[in-house]
Image (cartoon, grey):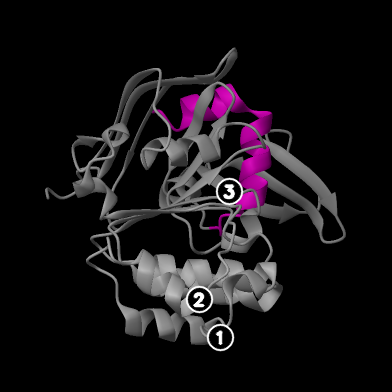
Amino acid sequence: MENNKPIVKIENLRFSYRRHLVFEDLSLGLEAGRIYGLLGENGVGKTTLLRIICGLLKAKSGDCTVFGIESSSRNPEILKDIYYVPEIFIAPAIPVIRFAESNSLLYPGYDPAQFERLCKTFDVNTDYRFDRLSHGQQKKALIAFALSLNTRVLLMDEPSNGLDIPSKTTLRRVISECATEERVIAISTHQVRDLENLIDPIVILDREGMILNASVEEISRKLLFTVSPEPDPSAYWCENSIAGYAQVIPNRDSEASKVNIEALFNAVLKNKETFKKLFRS
């Protein structure tokens, strides 16, 4: 595969549910070696996009290809190397280990030792019946299974929902450890703090399409995330706090700052057209 050639390529995508238009003209490429964060308000189409990529939904027009093959064709060459972790999962009435053994048969990259190791890391007993685990334990078992399949495309919808704070920390660590230069991971979330220091690039969607698609490096080069005693009149977003005014402002002097994803999200939603132009140039 050529360097920087997208594994997933979306061009001029249009999708609607009957009269409800979700995407009008969406174009996006997902490259190997990246962990993409798909952000947006509820109902903007994050889950829909993941389902289109894995072939569960078909676009009205435009193209979505994975490894150069139309995703809606459900071609076995795609299916063996792509896995989708839904937000809502109905656990079967079988032991976790049996679920893994039976559902991994179509995935040549499955590593049973890795699955056991990840379940142990998440403190999930693989001998327990899946449907009798708590919601959080079910989520962790499914994530462990998804990561151990070692598919080159991994799609995760709200993976941190239902997890306690220690488990969210573990989630970030294991995803980072399982990321490779050959693999693309796309994570849809509205819990942006749960995935800070993990997702890069950041993609922000709204009901008209895509507002932003940029790496953390590019974001920090163009924006400054700061806390100041007084509000900056040029701020894209500003919020008063005990420590001062948390702000997102233009980075005029190439200062270094840590990207605050929640502040970025608020700034983008408040200044959609400005950010489209700022990150298109």
State the residue position of label 2: 96
State the residue position of label 1: 125
> Picture coordinates of residue 30 (x, y %)?
33, 44
> Picture coordinates of residue 27 (x, y %)?
36, 27
Query: 74 and 243: which one is in front?
Result: 74
Please rate how many residues cluster around mark 1, counting C-alpha atoms within 10 Å: few if below 14, some from 14 to 19, many from 20.
some
Q: Give the range drawn in magenta.
A: 257-281
Q: Earlier in the sequence, mark 1 or mark 3?
A: 1
Q: Which of marks 3 and 2 is in front?
A: 2
Quarter of the image where the C terminus is located: top left
Q: Residue 224 carries which label?
A: 3
In the image, taking residue 198 as reference, residue 90 lies left or right, namely right
Type of residue at label 3?
Leu
Q: How far apart are marks 3 and 2 (CA)?
A: 46 Å
- Pointers 3 and 2 in contact (C-beta within 8 Å): no
Local SS, label 3: strand
- Pointers 1 and 2 in contact (C-beta within 8 Å): yes
Please rate how many residues cluster around mark 2, counting C-alpha atoms within 10 Å: few if below 14, some from 14 to 19, many from 20.
many
Query: 82 and 183: which one is in front?
Result: 82
In the image, taking residue 272 as reference, residue 187 lies left or right, namely left
Local SS, label 1: loop
Q: Earlier in the sequence, mark 3 or mark 2?
A: 2
Q: Distance between the residues labelled 1 and 3?
A: 45 Å
Residue 280 higher or lower than 118, as above or below = above
Local SS, label 2: helix
In percent of the image, x 24 and y 68: which residue is there? 109
In percent of the image, x 49 and y 81: which residue is there? 119
> Picture coordinates of residue 135 (x, y %)?
68, 67
